[in-house]
Amino acid sequence: MKIRSLLLVLVLGTSLISFPAQAASQLSVGVAYDIGGRGDKSFNDASAAGLDKAKKQFDFNVEAVVTDGTTADREKRIRSLIAKNCNPIIAIGAGYSSTLQALAVEFPNTHFAIINDASVAALNVTSVIFANTQGAYLAGFSAAQVSKSGKVAMIANSSQADIYKDGFSAGVFASKKKVIPIVKYVSGSYSAATNQVIDAGADVVYVATQGSDSEVFKVIVARNAKKKGSVVGLINVEPDQYITVTNATKKFLIASVVKRVDKAIYDIIALSTEKKQYLDILDADAGIYGRRYGITGGGIEFTIRSRELSALSGSINIAAATAEKISA
């Protein structure tokens, strides 16, 4: 079951800018995948889904490359797309940020976009980010609703302190349950952090850091195999990881905060067919522009996995209406 806000009739204001026309008549879209390319069951696959949907709707050529993850290779891949007259060029993941910062200046007539990053200051770069605090609020609210121990935890890195304070813990307290939120900021092992919050009594864990879901989930599965009575559940952040778990372990996955990367890719291409790009102000002081996707418009979805939580979908919809008002 996917939870969206009840206020979907609202539409975010959109700032658009046109970019120079290409010499060729047909649009040529360049996609620079992150490490692994298609088949990663994460951001690359979600991006590919948006690309495939756009191909069914619009007429354009596609040039795709995959990086090995090094800075030198990322630059090489982007330059290869520029040489093929791709415009726009969409980079999947924050790993491309330093590359685009340099190349955007060198190639001002090329429209770039970067997914899940807002650090590149250039008018010809569309930064796409997601309202993580909104998703964390729903995670906290939902975790509190189903907790049996009265303690729930968020595992994150230190840069996500505001997401915990304004999102997860705010959602826990909004549930009006006598539940204590715990936060564990990680600079090393996510496995160790997961064991620590479970030892502290948490029976629902929300992992907010992209790419750490599998590590956390493995610990939860192992701990549940040894537990008697109530089990520990996971709420993760993703492009959807549900298909990577087995029938025996999927019962431990309570819900997912889903960043609709596919929608962002589709939208970028759709605008490009009109020779336009998103130019919402993300950071006026830094000069960063693009689009922040949130609950409004379906950029953030909350997918319920457990029957217990599904029975509370009405309350979660109400919480979603509150969450979408959070600006960060």
Image (cartoon, grey):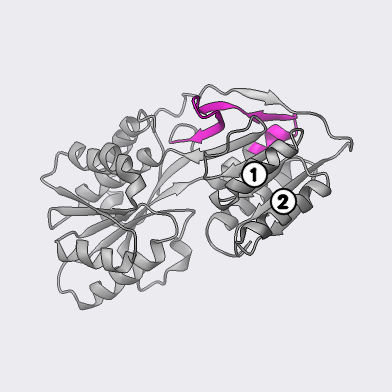
Q: In the image shown, does 199 or 298 lie closer to the viewer? A: 199
Q: Where residue 197 sits: x, y (%)?
A: 21, 61
- For residue 143, above or below residue 321: below
- Which residue lies under the disc numbered 2? 78
Q: Are marks 1 and 2 in contact (CB under 8 Å)?
A: yes
Q: Looking at numbered disc 1 in the image, what kind of residue is underneath it?
A: Leu
What residue does disc 1 label? Answer: 100
Residue nearest the observer in this picture, 24 or 12: 24
Q: Which residue lies furthest to the bottom in this view?
A: 226
x, y percent for residue 227 = 18, 74
- In the depicted structure, whether residue 209 falls above or below residue 245: above
Look at 60% across and 27% down and name the residue there: 279
| Residue drawn where x is 12% and y is 53% of the image | 150
Q: Which amino acid, mark 2?
A: Ile
How far across and how far down the image is residue 311, in percent? 27, 48
Q: In which quarter of the image is residue 220?
A: bottom left
- Relative to 189, 200 lies left or right: left
29 and 11: which one is in front?
Answer: 29
Magenta region:
268-294
Number of disc labels:
2
Residue 281 can be seen, yes or no: yes
Measuring from the top left, give residue 149's x and y in whole percent: 12, 58
Asked if residue 269 can be seen in this view, the reply is no
Q: Does the magenta stretch include residue 285?
A: yes
Around disc 1, counting alpha carbons within 10 Å, would you say few (fewer than 14), some (14 to 19), or many (20 or more)? many
Quadrant location of the C terminus?
top left
- Residue at x 34%, y 52% (from the top left corner): 157
Q: Inspect the magenta stretch and tell me whether residue 12 lies in it.
A: no
